[in-house]
Amino acid sequence: MNRTVELRNHLRELHNFRLRLVISAGFVLVLLLLLFSRFYYLQVIQREHYHTLAEANRISIAPIVPNRGLIFDRNGEVLAHNYSAYTLEIVPSKVDNLETLINELSTVIDIAPRDRKRFKKLMEESKRFESLPIRTRLSDVEVARFAANRYRFPGVEIKARLFRQYPKGESASHVVGYIGRINDKDLEQLEVNGDLSNYRGSQSMGKIGIEQSYETELHGITGFEEMETDAAGRVIRVISRTPPVSGNNLMLSLDAKLQEVAEKAFGDRRGALVAIEPSSGDILAFVSKPGFDPNLFVDGIDSENWDLLNNSIDRPLNNRALRGMYPPGSTFKPFMALAGLELKKRWPQQAINDSGYFSLPGSTHRFRDWKAGGHGIVDLHKSLVVSCDTYYYGLANDLGIDNIFSFTSQFGLGKKTGIDIEGEVAGLLPSQEWKMKRHKQKWYAGDTISVGIGQGYNLATPLQLAFATAILAGNGTAYRPHLVKKVLDNNNEVLREIVTQPLYTLNLNAANLATVRNALIDVTRAGGTAAVAGAGAAYTFAGKTGTSQVVGMKQGEKYVENKIQERHRDHALFVAYAPAETPKIALSVLVENGGHGGSTAAPIARLVMDYFLLGKLPEESAAKAVDQSGDEEEETPAELHTHD
């Protein structure tokens, strides 16, 4: 059998081997090049990034919250300050069963039901990884007791924190405001403003009043510590420290003692008072009654207290002086009288025969005076002294709404004053344009009549009335009302002082101004509507009473106060300045449902002026204004009602 023998080609095999070897070597070389490129990318190009990550495993940065600036009154009395205390805090994300943990904690540290409610509310407003306080202001004994049991409670720690305190409590609470826990809305705003990094570690910020409006000044600059930590997160050493910069202190124009006198004068009544220095715009007193205790908000207000404040029929959280809009009533008449003189619709000696009502030509409708039967012969001086409605019905009709609007708006009515706290409303000074835009109706002559005595659509805030009165007292010169007088460093050295330049000066005829101001002095004397408040004063002051209706009544219906529900009774108003010759204080007083301005609001103003000008403290009984017989008190005509 023949067999074919194939001979091996050694040269070919060697060639193939070498080819495979070259390919393999090339493949390995490519892999080495890729590996080297990766090493180069990680070691050279990405060195800083991974170095930072590595350092972050052993270095942590902790923010240092700055001391918040203090708030003083004009005499250096403290209205807001800080103190340090221990808090017991929980990080919810580090706890498996929160309810069980809190129950166990309560065996070591007393945790009241209100603490649990507040903590639950904070949980709803915060992120789970944040440290949240469940107890504040721990005693030294409680701190020691927890330290001995620390191992039992992972995710729980004791921290030393600064707390805000308002030593005056309710006094000036709407002015000073309060701080509260930073929420999601606050964080969004901080991010928009570019301030978020400066609030690392901060738990609270200003919510209303000076605390809110001057947050940037008060907060300060956050510092930080760079610390080396071990694998368990324990601090080994502090590498570097950048100290925080404390917030600036603020000195207000407010006189804390005058504020307390004014608040006490109200007693249990609801209302507002604003006192201004006419020559500077300094706010001397700023009262909204009832007030609230801002200390309740510092740790996060509990639901029980929140419900009491928020649902109270007295609305203690409402800043009546800044946001309350009320018909100015007869306190509007001095500006009407001045408009009549300046626009030559009246002259001082011109008189009317007041029979107790006014009717528009061709109309049988009667706009009645507050005094049945009228005041007889009335000139401009008497119209202010006795507050004759009939005189101002006719004057309003002669002026027309456009003239009333353009002239009285110069005194700041119908627009914001620009005070340096947030939340101010503009009030309402009506015009034809406003009514068409708001109600889609044309303006009627009867609308003008009501506006002429500060009723109808006319609404003003107590702050606006005080501002307008200050302009009148200052012979037409207006200063922007402000609360902050000086910005101080933490050593109370002056950094910046508020410069009080006039906003504008009205071009008013001196004789016309003197006519109105002389009449306002006689309002506080015998025969005037504020004679009771003016009796026995050691200085001369000028004022104007006002009464504005809360609910409407039919024409001819008699207003009988004791037959009307208390919250439906008239509001009492009074504006004044003193001394009349060289005014140092101008103020407005509003007493909700207080009845007559002369018997309720004016005595409050008198107590405030007595203290400010004479240093005279009111007696306990003086806070209760008693209507004395023998002096006339104006009323608002029953058929005129307010428009809200």
Image (cartoon, rainbow, N blue to C red):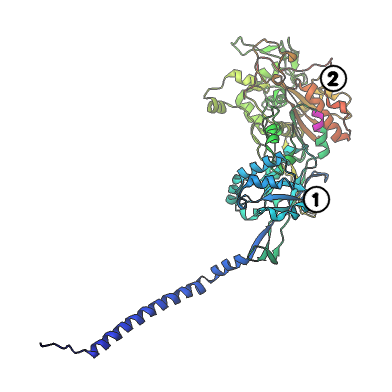
SS at circle 1: helix
Where residue 15 sits, quadrant-wise, is: bottom left
Residue 35: name its quadrant. Answer: bottom left
Q: Who comes first in sequence, dot 2 or dot 1?
A: 1
In this figure, which residue is indicated by the disc labeled 2? 526
C-alpha distance separating marks 2 and 1:
67 Å
Residue at 62% in and 14% down: 360
Q: Is residue 214 visible?
A: no
- Whether 264 is among the magenta residues is yes
Indicate the secondary structure of the residue bearing disc 2.
loop
Q: Is residue 341 above or below residue 85?
A: above
* Residue mark closest to the camera, 2 vs 1: 1
104 and 397: which is toward the camera = 104
Q: Which residue is rendered at x = 78% and y = 20% of the image?
A: 385
Q: Amino acid at mark 1?
A: Val
Quadrant of the snapshot with the C terminus: top right
- What x and y, as percent, mark residue 162? 74, 51
The disc labelled 2 sits on which kind of residue? Ala
Where does the magenta region start and end? 262-266
Q: Nearer the viewer, residue 573 or 51?
A: 51
Task: Report which residue position mark 1 lands on.
Answer: 141
Residue 403: horizontal and vertical position, in percent? 62, 27
